[in-house]
Image (tube, coloured by chain):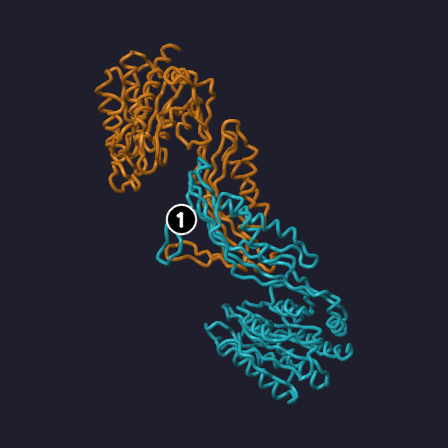
Chain colours: A cyan, B orange
Amino acid sequence: MDVVSLTEKLVSLPSSQSSKGLVGNFEADTEQFIFNTLREKLSNQWKIRRQKVVNDRYNLIVDDGTPTQLLLIGHMDVVEPGEAWSKNILGESVGNLLYGRGSADMKSGDAIIMTTLMYAASQNIPGVAALFYCDEEYEFLGMKKYINNTPKPEFLKLVVCPEPTDMKIRQGVRGCFECKLIIRGKRGHSARPNSGVNAYRALAVAINAVDNLCKEKNNTVFGVPTVNVAGLSCGTIKGTDYSGNKIIEHTGNVIPDYCEATLELRITPEIAQEEIENTLRTAIQSTNASLTLLETSFFVGSYLTKKEDLNLLEAAQKIIRGDIQYDNPANGGYSDIQMISEKWQIPCALFGPTGTNMHSADESVDIKSLKKTESIFHKLVDQLRISS
Amino acid sequence: MDVVSLTEKLVSLPSSQSSKGLVGNFEADTEQFIFNTLREKLSNQWKIRRQKVVNDRYNLIVDDGTPTQLLLIGHMDVVEPGEAWSKNILGESVGNLLYGRGSADMKSGDAIIMTTLMYAASQNIPGVAALFYCDEEYEFLGMKKYINNTPKPEFLKLVVCPEPTDMKIRQGVRGCFECKLIIRGKRGHSARPNSGVNAYRALAVAINAVDNLCKEKNNTVFGVPTVNVAGLSCGTIKGTDYSGNKIIEHTGNVIPDYCEATLELRITPEIAQEEIENTLRTAIQSTNASLTLLETSFFVGSYLTKKEDLNLLEAAQKIIRGDIQYDNPANGGYSDIQMISEKWQIPCALFGPTGTNMHSADESVDIKSLKKTESIFHKLVDQLRISS
């Protein structure tokens, strides 16, 4: 089976977490298809195990029974269908593009992993293994289950995930910290600034402190961590509405006593959760306002693999492309391959085909790049034999 | 009639703009009472004219038919009743305090003006006039009508308003600027900061610019103008609710495209409306966001009279108190006496009795200070004769 028809088949199987519209069966059909196909195509020497994650959601763990040297990982879930599709969300090819939800992110990557396993089997190259996992797009349940229940393979050299990277090597991703803050000041009359404590001004002090912390944490590859003030509501509380939401008034001559904000940071390896939280707390303590809530809703670290630890992948890329290309890891979103890097301290990379409109309407994968990326993965397997 | 019983009578006449609860007759009864009392107590030489402001709301303009040298002004409206009164809102004396809405702000001041007119009449001291006016607490309709329709009296030396100032001279008040801003950025994914334009960050630049403008405008009497960020709402717009209000979401990984804010500045004579507006515009133009609304809802200037131009009032204060006391004009709210100062370029001062809880529950005036302030006003009339 070629990689394009495998991708088409995978895209035709809905695997969104959303229950809305067309798509609502989680990864069950996708996982069943991958399981059946590999069971049929690989010899009995290969082990294909299902790892239960939650309810009917599973990871698939595949190896040839020899110590794993190269681990290929791909998630089986996709984001919700969304609106405004002009192409068939379950797959439609137009020229060099294959459209459909997950065509780029990352059913095409799963297809590449499948043919690469078959290639390793056909070439009798040992040590190639794969993880197909669930729930990458939302809660990372699949990766968490896997990494917490799998011992580090002793001879593992490299983990690669074919997320769409425009056929460039992504050697790391920034981590992510998100928190909600509530700050209380004291109401007062603006004509007498000392009669109140402006809750917004205390938040501004805290934002400034976090901005400065980030500037100190410049990373040669990622640059400085960035701070997204994602939401902010400040004013005077006038009770709650029928839904229990606070009614916040903006009255010019009243010094506002309430400020809530959602901050989200994209972080580098030099910055820890506690350091951000302490910076916020200390800054607000330096004002006359009080911090009544600091709730970290989300923290995941970053990872960064040195280029010299990616020589196998560089070599495979160079054979097919003619050059070695990295993308800017500061521009990529979080990927849960980071959890493997953190737990096992193993070289990790994202490397996949060219995709467009990931997470939005008319997502597509470039078919030429898909085939080329597949070739690079097969060459990577070859490199494994050469290097051992 | 003595000043305390006059105050009691005035406080017993509701004159709030609010239609809620006890009080809802505007200033009509108060104005009628002042008119009738003065008509009865002053000789026919005195002119008492009603100036229509709006609907049934009037200013009362009183003079003795000679050129005005000293103008005493007092507003007849009070703020809404409000809640949590433990004393009778229409007047209750306990020891040295007379409670009631308007007891301090400023029915007691109106009573002082009334007895001072009677004192001038009894002493045959010419040139004392008064303005009793409406709508000081809300829209300044009374003062606007007066100042736009009254020629500057040629021999006018001083305007005094007995708002409660703890028997200290207030030589000026800061002005007030209030605006609403709406800033639009561009949604984006926080993992790629360049994919969007954070509307909040643009606002923060604008606030910073206005803070800096104010620091440059330090005034030896008022200090620096102060900026109240009175309300702020930032996030991603998700449509409107049934009431037509914007639904603004705070989503950590989304760069917010919407920010609205209410800013209110307490300003000094060195700062003009256009300068503030231009500072905001220029600051936001320096960002990648756009200013879609800059609506100045309120602008009134400041005024500041030199101490050497207040020697009549100083002299009267010194005779009764034994010393000369000024309060800090940076701590006072706006007063529409400023409009007279600006239009006529005449020395103006606020000077009145000791009050507590103005605009809130259990407002009261200190009776001893009320009598003492009355004496100072009578001495001020004497000064007029001495100085002429």
Which residue was labeled with disc 1?
A237
Quarter-wise, where is residue B324 in the image?
Answer: top left
A26 to B205, vertically: above or below: below
Position of the N terminus of chain B by quadrant: top left
Position of the C terminus of chain B by quadrant: top left
A259 or B142: nearer the eye? A259
Quarter-wise, where is residue A102 in the image?
Answer: bottom right
> What chain does mark 1 sit on?
A
Residue shown at 50%/76% (left/top)?
Answer: A54
Where in the figure is residue A258, as x and y percent of width and height? 44, 48
Where in the figure is residue B121, as x and y percent of width and height? 28, 14
Where in the figure is residue A329, as x and y percent of width and height? 66, 62
Residue A33 visible to the viewer:
yes
A189 or B186: nearer the eye? A189
Q: Is residue B327 left or right of residue A337?
A: left
Residue lying farthest to the right in this orientation: A386
B203 to A105, vertically: above or below: above
Q: Is residue A266 left or right of residue B79?
A: right
Residue shown at 42%/57% (left/top)?
Answer: B240
Residue shown at 53%/81% (left/top)?
Answer: A29
The number of discs equals 1
Identified by mark 1, the residue type is Ile
Residue B154 visible to the viewer:
no
Label 1 residue SS: strand
A133 to B122, vertically: above or below: below
Where in the figure is residue B322, as x and y percent of width and height? 40, 16
